[in-house]
Image: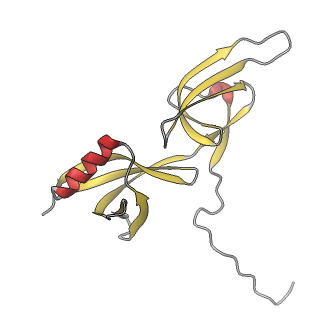
């Protein structure tokens, strides 16, 4: 071996995949699936019978979890589909900046400043109103395939 030291840049996700394979026939309603490279929540699944020469096919209808667009895909039931890793994390809201970004408190005590306010008007109104009233707010951030978005809000009481 050589005397040189090798230095590797540390990656935060340890190279983990953004998706995992799952057989199409086992994916059910309310599960997740990747359609056209977008993470989707499955709202409808129908399976067709096998033809004379073919496979049974699964017809998926999914709603994109970030932009709420409806997407469809048809896959042979014996083939694998990509299923996104979807995680939800709660953060305490510290501040809302004028340019539409939020400042969140992480569990380790650091701050997370790279998230925009949600585009959903109802949720956006609740966050802005609650923050203006000085309430302690906890937002739920859904992340999948390298994207993150605020998807829910909890009020944990007034600030002391």
Depicted 133 relative to depicted 95: above or below: above
Q: Which colour scheme is used?
A: secondary structure
Residue at (80%, 11%) from the top-left corner?
51
Q: In this view, does 110 lie to the left or right of 70?
A: left
The residue furthest bottom is 3
* Quarter of the view holding residue 60: top right
Residue 145, percent from left and from top: 58, 50
Relative side of 133 to 13, left or right:
left
Identity of the residue drawn at 71% across and 81% down: 7
Q: Indicate the quadrant where residue 75 lies.
A: top right
Q: In this view, does 140 lie to the left or right of 24?
A: left
Q: Is residue 71 above or below residue 104?
A: above
Q: In this view, does 153 lie above or below 55?
A: below
Horizontal side of residue 152 vs 148, given as left or right:
left
| Image coordinates for residue 59, horizontal then vertical, percent | 64, 22
Quadrant of image for the C terminus: bottom left
Residue located at (64% from left, 56% from top): 16
Q: In which quadrant will I find the N terminus?
A: bottom right
- Residue furthest to the front in view is 99
- Residue 113 percent coordinates (x, y): 40, 66
Q: Which residue lies furthest to the top in this view?
A: 52
Q: How many marks?
A: 0
Tell which of 114 and 29 is nearer to you: 114
Q: Where is residue 115 in the image (x, y as percent from the top left)?
A: 42, 59
């Amino acid at each position: 071996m050589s005397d040189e030291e090798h230095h590797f840049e540390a990656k935060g996700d340890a190279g983990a995949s953004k998706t995992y394979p799952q057989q199409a026939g086992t994916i059910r309603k309310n599960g997740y699936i990747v359609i056209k490279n977008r993470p989707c929540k499955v709202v409808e699944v129908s399976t067709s019978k096998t033809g004379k020469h073919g496979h049974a096919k699964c017809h998926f209808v999914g709603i994109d979890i970030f932009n709420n667009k409806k997407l469809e895909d048809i896959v042979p039931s014996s083939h694998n589909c990509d299923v996104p890793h979807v995680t939800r994390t709660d953060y305490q809201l510290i501040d809302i900046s004028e340019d539409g970004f939020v400042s969140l408190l992480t569990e380790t005590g650091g701050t997370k400043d790279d998230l925009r306010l949600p585009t959903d008007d109802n949720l956006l109104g609740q966050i802005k109103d609650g923050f203006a009233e000085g309430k302690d707010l906890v937002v739920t951030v859904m992340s999948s395939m390298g994207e993150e978005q605020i998807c829910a809000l909890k009020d944990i009481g007034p600030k002391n």
